[in-house]
Structures are given as C-alpha cells and as structure tokens.
Image (cartoon, rainbow, N blue to C red):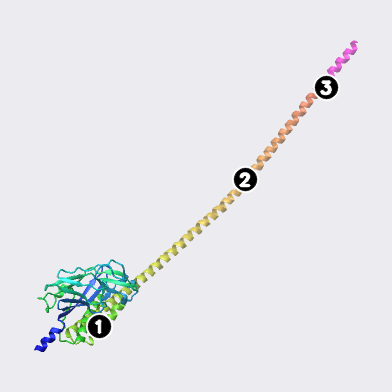
Amino acid sequence: MAIISALLSVLPSVLCAKEFTDTLHTEGGDAVIIRYSIEYDGNDILVSASGTPRIIPSDKLRKACRGDLDKLDVVIFGRVGDFGDVRWNGLNPATFMVPANLDYRKNDEGFHILGESQPIVFTKRDGNGAQVDFPVFIALPERKQSYRIMARTSAPLKVRMAGEADKGRRADAATYGDVRARSHADPKPAENEADMSNAMGSIEMIRRLLAEADGLPFSQTLQMEIYNLGALKNRITDRAVIDEINAVMFEYTRKEAELKERQNAAALAAKAEEQALLARQKSEEEARQKEAEEEARLQAEQQQKRTFGMIAGGAVLAVLCFIGNAVIKHLGNVRNQRNIMEMQQSLTRQAESEAHRRSQSAIQDAVRKRRNNSTRKSI
C-alpha cells in the first residue's frame, strides 16, 4: 500500500479526461465538426483537438480551396496581434475572454491550429467551474507564413471546465450541442473507443450531408464518409453504435432512392415538357407557314390586280392619246384653214385696195390731163 501511495505521489495527477464533439456553423453556410478533449492535470486544464476538425464547406469555400479540404485550417487565436513572422489576412482575428478564476498559459505563436498545435492550457485559481467561449475561424494558407481568414463561426466553441464538485461526472450533452463524453477509466479497448468516436462523428456528418443533398450523384465527401463508416463498422463491437451505423446507412439508401425517384420524375417531366415544346413549336411553325402562304397568295392577287389595272390604264391612256392626237390634229387643221382664209381675205383686201388706189390714180391722171388740155386750148 505504501508503494502504491509513493507511485501516485510522483505520477501526474490526471483526474479525468473527457472527449466531446461539437458542430459549429458560419454565416456563409460552412459547418465545422470539432472533436476535442478536456484533460485535468492537477490545477492545469488542457483543451486539445482530437485530430483535425472536419469541415463541410459551402460552394464559396470549396472554390476557394479548389476542392482540397486538407488545405483548410481551423484556428483559435490567443491574442489579436503580434503573431511574429506569420501574417493573417482577410477577416480580423478575435480572441477569447479568460474567466477570472483561470489563467491562460500563452504560447509563443499567439494562435492554435486545431489538430496541429499544442493543447490550450489554463491554470485554475480556485475549485469552481468555468466556461471559455472560443471564437473559431477557418483559414486558408496563401503562401509560406501567410494565411487568409475565410470565415468565422456564428457561435463560439463553448468549453466548460468542471469544478472540483463536478469532476468524474458525465457532462450534460445538451450544454455542448451534440456531445459524447468518455473517461480514460472506461474498460473498453482504446482502439474500439477511437473507432466508436470516429463512427459517431461520421454519422453526424453523413446526416448533415444527407439533409443538404438535393440531387444525385452524392458529393464526394458524403461517399467517402459512407465508405469510411462501412470500414469502421467491421471493427466495432458495440451493439448501440452498430445500430446507429445501420440506421444512417438505411437513411442513406432511402435518400438515394428518393432522389432517384425524384430525378426520374424530373426527367419524365422534362421529357414531357420537351415533347410539348416540340409540338407547340411545330404547331407554331405550321401556323407561320400557313400565314406566309396566305400572305403570299394575297400579295399575288394584289399584284395581279395591279397588273390588270396597269394594263387597263395603259389602254385607256392609249385611247386618250389617240383621241387627243386626233383633236389636236383637227384643231391644227382648223387653225390652218382659218389662217388660209385670213390670208386669202388679206390678199383680197390688198387687191381691192390696190385696185382702188390704181383707179383713183387713173382718175386723178385723167383729171390732170384734162386740165392740162384745157389750159393749152385757152392759151
């Protein structure tokens, strides 16, 4: 008994370590699934991520990382500036508030990349419990020592540290969202426990992806999760977890059948709509053709009428021209005859005048001669 007491006195005082899973969302529609553990070591409290957080990206975030989700990092900042050689672009970093009964052990970098950095360490000042709200960010490495903050979760990661009176008791799952806790004192094998935890995380992600899926084929992320969950099922012996896996597999199959049925119905509706569109287009084309033929017929009739009108008009014009020429010729003849008559009358008048003048001249000559003869006789 003394030996056991001596060993306990030199070994670290690890009272309890619990693991949780929480799902956070960003305003852009991204989801972050974080598995983390809280470990109590004397007065120290260590908060560390259990592996790399899973990110269910929106289309915008997926395009930003070009579909390579391994490029994305989930970050918690210990301060808002002085990050040494590391530059943070995009959104402004925000840090967490430290409760009065805790001391935060700052690290050199000033930030924690979940799944890569060392645990976040707090030191208790008293035996009371505390809660720390961690703002969570999604960042994308741009180049060496440079990151761009792409998104921030709408709600912080709420981590509650148990007080002395709460140690060893199971945390209330409703406090953390979808949370599952376990103790290192659990007698089940560690490998099976890790597989069970991974399976529960996969189940949560699959259900979320199924809720978001609205068409086939399913996303590559969902198909990979189904494949991984099937592999985990072969290594798990816990009946409750296996039932959960079977249930989500059934949900996957049912969702796939629903989407196939919806897809087939949509295809049939699209085909019917296409046929109706083709029939409508054919009917419209026939109507346009008939309308064009009718318009061509009317134009031909109008052209024929115009041709007949032009012919009739030409004939009338020819007759009028003939009559006009005849009238003009007649008027010319009348004018010529009148001119001839006037000329004859003028010549007659001239002849009469000349005869009268000559007769007068003859009379005057005769009178003059008589006078001259009388004068000679008298002499």
- The quarter of the displayed image where residue 283 is located: bottom left
Determine if residue 312 is in view: yes
**Where is mark 1, residue-wise?**
229
Q: In the displayed structure, would residue 369 be above or below residue 257?
A: above
Q: Which residues are magenta?
A: 362-379
Outermost residue, left direction? 1
Marks 2 and 3 sit apart, C-alpha to C-alpha, by 57 Å
**Where is mark 2, residue-wise?**
323
Residue depicted at x 76% and y 27%: 352
Position of 237 with respect to 322 (left or right) is left
Q: Earlier in the sequence, mark 2 or mark 3?
A: 2
**Where is mark 3, residue-wise?**
362
Q: Secondary structure at mark 2?
A: helix
Q: Is 345 in front, or is 289?
A: 289
Determine if residue 185 is in view: no
Mark 3 residue crowding within 10 angstroms, few (<14) / some (14–19) / many (20+): few
Mark 1 residue type:
Leu
Mark 2 residue type:
Ile
